[in-house]
Amino acid sequence: MRTCNPRGFVLEHYLRLATTSPQDSLSVLQVMTQSPRLSQELDVSDEHPPFFSRLGFLEAGPVNVCGFYLSGASRIFGSNAATTAIILPMQGTVEFRVNGCHFLSSPGVPFILQPNVEFHATLPPEVDAFIVQLSDHGETDQPIPLENGDPQLAALLESYLVETRFFRGHEHAVQRTGFFGAVLKRYCCGDSLAASELTPSMLMAHEHRLCRAFELIHERLPTGQDLELRVIACDAGLSIRNLYYLMGKYTGMTPYTYCQSRRLIKARESLICHYGEDPVVANHGRKWGFNHAGRFSSYYYGHFGEYPSDTVQGLGALKQFADKVFSADAGIPGSKHYWYTSSVNTQA
């Protein structure tokens, strides 16, 4: 992405699952995308990294957006849902095969998956991708006239992704995602100027000192180092006044609210990844500086639109079809393993 891009996973505000289980990953991907059938071939040889998956989802207005991270060389194939999907890798190159045609999708090169088609996607050992499903694209069943590799479409998607780093809360996230969906819908209907409505956020890339300040916050927050904002500003080559001004101009956030947002994101990640080891919700907030359980719950709700307990309950609901994922090996020890979902009603 050609922008100021603080490190993190795509759509990490709405992380729903982080797992080493292919069954859970494939099941949740099926549920959240409403795909009728998905399968995965996983390379389990020692030369590839072990399997790990992260999935983030948010639905707002005419779009369902998904952040998809996968470690472990694999191939995903099956049937797309009854919606158009746009896939933009942020890391790694994905080879798609649909109706006998091949297309290589890479950062800046989106791929369009039309409704109800059979597809094969060959993934690299590590891939981070942004997926957009257009849940309301008009009254007809005609394919949306989008082109693979469209640079204007890529710029529109990238501009939205810049904004996702700076969601100020759940209401803001839903509003901006809904606006993104409306702009994308107009672009699909032939309004080529629509793509320019989100691109000004990319100008942040020219503020190199601000980008450095974001990098320093991301580097120091997990280590427990003192996040004295004057030190952050100084180390980035800014005055504290300029740090406040530039961050407000480009993100609408203060440095303090940005740091609190990052802590909430990390607390959510801890809850999703480690609740089984530590079922005391308050401990996951305390780990990231929220020492008052009631306030942590309130901040969490404002930021994600759900309470910590809802996040925990959601994990179980998302995995409801995991026991319907079947596995089989390739017959050669240490080579490949296959996982298959059944055709289930994912909206049940």
Image (spheres, helix red, strand yellow):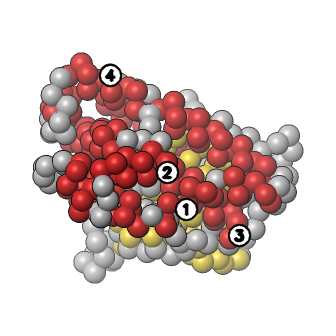
Q: Nearer the viewer, residue 93 or 255?
A: 255
Q: Earlier in the sequence, mark 2 or mark 3?
A: 3
Task: Classify residue 7 by image quadrant.
Answer: bottom left
- Which sits earlier in the primary sequence, circle 4 or circle 1? 1
Provide the secondary structure element on which disc 3 rests: loop
Q: Earlier in the sequence, mark 1 or mark 2?
A: 1
Mark 1–mark 2 CB contact (< 8 Å): yes
Foreground label between 4 and 2: 2
Residue 49: x and y in percent read 28, 72
Q: Residue 75, which numbered label?
A: none
Helix, strand or loop under label 2: helix
Q: Which mark is residue 150?
A: 3
The first of marks 4 and 3 along the sequence is 3
The alpha-carbon separation of the residues under discs 4 and 2 comes to: 26 Å
Q: Is residue 284 left or right of residue 331?
A: left
Query: Residue 298 shows which numbered tag?
Result: 4
* Depicted 47 relative to depicted 343: above or below: below
Q: Amino acid at mark 1?
A: Leu
Q: Looking at the picture, which amino acid does disc 2 mark? A: Tyr
Single out the mark in the foreground, 3 or 1: 1
Hey, what amino acid is under mark 3?
Asp
Mark 2 — residue?
250
| Sequence-first disc among 4 and 2 | 2
Which residue is labeled 1 in the image? 203
- 81 relative to 117, above or below: above
- Left or right: where does residue 196 sit relative to residue 318? right
In what quadrant of the picture does the C terminus appear? top right
Query: Who's the residue at 24% across and 48% down the image?
Result: 229
